[in-house]
Image: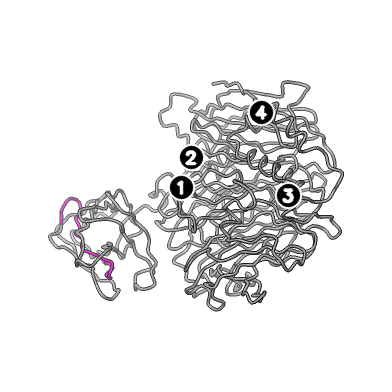
Amino acid sequence: MKRILLIVTNVLLIAVSAHCFAKESFRGVTLSSLLKEMTSREALARWPQNEFNLKQMSSYDRMSISPDKPGWFANFDLSTFLRVDSVKGRREFVMFDHSGPGAVVRFWMTFAGIHPGEGTMRIYIDNSDEPVVQGSPFEILSGGMLAPEPLSSSVSKDYRYNRRGHNLYMPIPYAQRCIITYESSNVREQNAGFGGENVYYNINYREYLPGTEVVSFSNEQLKLNSDLINKCSDFLMLPNFKERSVSLKPSVTPKNSSPGLSSKSVNLGPGSTFTERFQGEAAISRLSVKLENGSADNSFSLNQALRSVVIEIWFDGKRCVWSPVGDFFGTGYKISPHSTFYTDVHEDSLMESYWLMPYKESAEIKIVNHYNKEVSVDLEVLESEWRWDDSSMHFHASWREFNRLDAGGVKSNDLFGEGAFDVNYVEISGRGVFAGDALTLYNSAYAWWGEGDEKIYVDRESFPSHFGTGTEDYYGYAWCRPEKFTDHPFISQPDGSGNLEAGYTVNLRYRALDKLPFREHLKFDMEVWTWTDAILNFSPVTYFYLLPEVKSEIYFPDRTGTLITAEGGVKVEVVTDRRQLVPAVIKDGVNEFDQLFFKDKSNGRVSFDRSVNFETSNKAFVNWSGAVKGDTLVVKFYSDGEMPFNRMVVAYVCGRNFGKFKISVNGKESDQIIDSYSTVPLVKEIEVSGFESVKGENTIIITNMGKSNPEQTNYFVGIDYLRK
């Protein structure tokens, strides 16, 4: 099915932008220049004119010293500050202090504990004793004190405000120094992780080379640039490419030598390739792909096609992009609609990319079908003019999957996160700029999978200059809730159904002012730190630009049985059902209840509880909460044994918040009502009999029978394990 691209050119926007973004004589860094850079895709594709290092200060656990020492995976990433200053009788916790020319370009924060976020934040510029900005963190970061959305925002809007991820993308440049503090009587200086107010933060900042001229942030600069700030905010919030077809810095325009638009529709059989070639100096400014069933085959799976159809892009004779199509567009192997500054994915499965991809002489786009079905492909490419010079860089994308990754058992903060480990998103040699990433995963556990911190090493530094506080913090949200947000140009979670339950999740973080330059090498690791036993399919795609002057290499370390890349990875069957990772097969011996298949529930929520109050098997149990009397939970298991059995022992959790329940197996209901109320936490066993197991699928139904006593407000059901 061919489509015609309608490019809407807003003449008024062009005129206003050309006036507002006229070339300045000042070559240094200003609030104005940073705002223009943020909205220019061209700026991302060129080596920075004013060179800088991007670094991060965060509240990561300072027990993390070295990968070869205990504490590398320590997880008390909260209320950790540089120091405590006494200022005019106030106790101010210093989160950030940098001397020299610089700019804060991304500021993320969240809170927990007592009176979260009710303190006062102050930003001091250039050694002034008086703050240039003062207010609550919510007012400054997400409340619009400095800028409207999306420069000042919180996600997700469906979660309570003080537990959201608060994101400030409004740049704060400074010539000499910047200090950011937080004053709160609720923050404890000792053992901050136990009681009091808990403060989490990540601050990305640019460290410009000595001698770089910077006009410092001030209230006068804020007023002077108020119109520009509003225009940038409005521009970034435009919903799609047709309205964003003109940059606020209008230097990228459709190619004059032709209409600039190539549109093709082809049917690709298994193992076949379609190639589109372009000649001359130009840049791809928009690329769209749509996949559909290429035949009448009813077994066709769009999910599998999104993973098994690959996009390869060659620039000036060098392969720079290799990725499954779905991962490349930030949707993974399910259509997850969203709109960002760099990608749009639509309900009808149309996927669009606005990464600017320049080339000096030629470009070649290949669509390769590694699926064993015929696939219909619509491809559209928009070329734009580009002036190639010494600062021009080629766009790159790299994909990999950690397939059936054993995330380990329950970790303990007391043991410094033992059982956690790092996986590598990408490792690159060369000179360029890291521009963003997208993570697609399937989580087998009914528990949070993403406690791990990012660790980014630039130019072979011994300790990462970017050490984070959690995967959800890196991607801009917090507390892994709720399961979806798509209302920001640079961060998005178009699907988070696998966050706290078994299922699928996609996280995106695209970069603008927080782009990350490297001069010879970059290594990006992410901790795998889950709350309980989990098997993950964990698939990151990374986006970056490289100068062609230095031979670059993308490293794929050999981790046999875990890491899969290239053709081998895209041919593996994608996971759409938890049973593909956890078969739920009962064999002789003890079987953890969390290994079974949770088919259905009439109400409430299933979670894997790792409460330290209970002496449970493998330090966790399945907790069915939020249900009321009469609700049912359906659980299935599969027996591969030749001999059936007619009794089993159920280990259940008892405590003050646990009520009564009964069990049926394969339609045979036990007469016994199990009372799990107890004044002390413990685990009991009970024998369930009077049923007959069968080879293959068996069904357990748990029925909530209500409170054990009238004073209970909660009456959970907790199951630890089964044994024959």
Pick whichever of labels 1 and 3 is earlier in the sequence.
3
Pick whichever of labels 1 and 2 is earlier in the sequence.
2
Please tell me the numbered disc located at residue 433: 3
Asked if the residue under mark 2 is in contact with the one under mark 1, i.e. CB atoms within 8 Å, the reply is yes
The alpha-carbon separation of the residues under discs 1 and 3 comes to 30 Å
Which one is in front, 163 or 63?
Answer: 163
Tag 1: amino acid? Tyr
Depth check, mark 2 against mark 3: the one in front is: 3
x, y (%) of residue 226?
69, 45
Residue 318 shown in magenta: no
Q: Is 699 situated above or below 527?
A: above
Identify residue for label 1: 504
Identify residue for label 4: 381
Tag 4: amino acid? Val
The alpha-carbon separation of the residues under discs 1 and 4 comes to 30 Å
Asked if the residue under mark 3 is in contact with the one under mark 4, i.e. CB atoms within 8 Å, the reply is no
Please tell me the numbered disc located at residue 334: 2
